[in-house]
Image (spheres, rainbow, N blue to C red):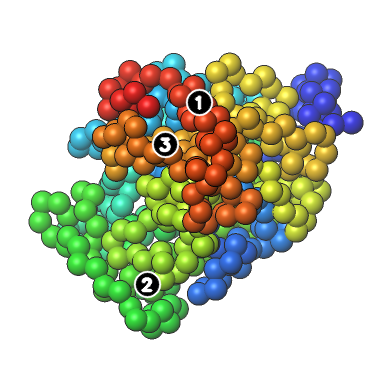
Amino acid sequence: MRLTTLLITLLAASPCWAKQAPNIIYILADDLGYGDLSCYGQTNFETPNIDRLAAQGMRFTQHYSGSTVCAPSRCALLTGKHVGHAAVRGNNEVRPEGQQPMPADTYTLAHLLKEAGYATGIFGKWGLGAPDSASEPLKMGFDRFYGYNCQRLAHHYYPYFLWNDDEREILWDNFGRETNVYAPDLIQEEALAFIEANKDRPFFCYYALVQPHAEMFAPEDYMEKHRGRYLPEKSFKGVDSGPRFRKGAYGSQPEAHAAFAAMVNHLDDDVGELVAKLEELGIDENTLIIFTSDNGPHQEAGHNPRYFNSNGGLRGFKRDLYEGGIRVPMIAKWPGHIAEGSVSQHVSAFWDVLPTVADLTGQSVPEGTDGISFLPSLLGEGEQTKHAYLYWEFHEKKGRIALRKGKWKAVRYGVSTNPDVPTQLFDLSQDPSESRNLAKQRPEVLRELERLMQEARTTSPIPKYNFPDT
């Protein structure tokens, strides 16, 4: 019997089934590249705890983020809509704190799971609505929130405050230029506390880590492990005082290479501690863990992704719609359900997560979503539906569009300034680095993908998120 059918049957038969539903932990790293994990080929340093997830579960090789920057990627994740249909299509800032909110009636993954009887919590970075807006976490289906509301303020690892549900928690030990409280440590404590508090009921923990995004800061004990190992070092002169200090501008880092490795080391240890907590509570076998990243590797505050091969040999970085900007690692572990050490080449994206969870819990997928469930791939049973195509758009850097259909990928750069800019065409099955433009050799494929590009999006009510005639 298919697992989802079994879930529905048990749900109908027993009002106590909610206690047996699998917990879901979705770990989202910030700007971690496809090649930044040793299980995906990183050789400069190791990520043993995340590698262990892969060894005990499934590693996806063709999974894509929702966008090439933070806010639209997270909107795609939570709503199941790609960026051509989503309400949030870019990093639209709100001052003094926050980003463009989603509409008040937005239905999210957290709403879906609350309806299934789950406790819901987000820990880390939100980035989808300013404080007191219509789309704070507690108004978007989450019972618990601890971390940064604003992605701009989440640049800072020693902030003046974090949000504890809907109240600011002042971090007095970080006042002035002090660096006594590393925010990821506090966020980790609250995530573990949420898991422990809900160990006897199903829970959804959306763990939106801020590492390894800039600024490039790690605690000294982690810096000591990596100092002097990645030479020649790279230094970065940032903002260390004045009116912009800890208000979005990155701080200085004279050892950026060591800092990056130290941040990933810290992230990996957080994952290991989380898994150990599940084992301690005896709930690890009833917990689905998914680990991924919100987009490709950044090039900010001194980080040099080329030095670390952070994009895994793919073309491009954060803000690109080539593979290096949007193809991300994804690992899924669920003991007894996902085959250990398995690898999936199924082509999937962030907007598939909501339909997958709906499939898992036996719920209906909301109308208007763009995703498809990848639960058959996770479980290795049933027929896996494939996407007709995947679509992305980006409204910085003169406007960018990309579409993947099967093995074919079409990319257009500069569409906001030149609607007639030529489209590039790549065969990812033969050329994953997108080095050979086949537009002239395969005009019939090019025409088909350009037609789909025209149909893939709807007009945004925010003018800056629309292109000229494309």
Residue that numbered label 3 is attached to: 401
Residue 265, percent from left and from top: 49, 67
- Name the quarter where the N terminus is drawn: top right
Residue 315, percent from left and from top: 46, 56
Sequence-first tag of 1 and 2: 2
Q: How many callouts does the rendering have?
A: 3
From this view, report whether residue 220 is shown above or below residue 231.
Answer: above
Determine the CA span between mark 1 and mark 3. 13 Å
Q: Residues within 10 Å of mark 1 (few under 14, many from 20)?
A: few
Q: Which mark is residue 257?
A: 2
Please report the residue visible at 43 percent of the width from the left and 39 percent of the height from the top: 423
Residue that numbered label 1 is attached to: 451
| Residue type marked 3 | Ile
Front position in the image: 340 or 428? 428
Please say whether residue 74 is visible from this viewpoint: no
Q: Which mark is residue 70?
A: none
Sequence-first tag of 3 and 2: 2
From this view, report whether residue 143 is shown above or below residue 333.
Answer: above
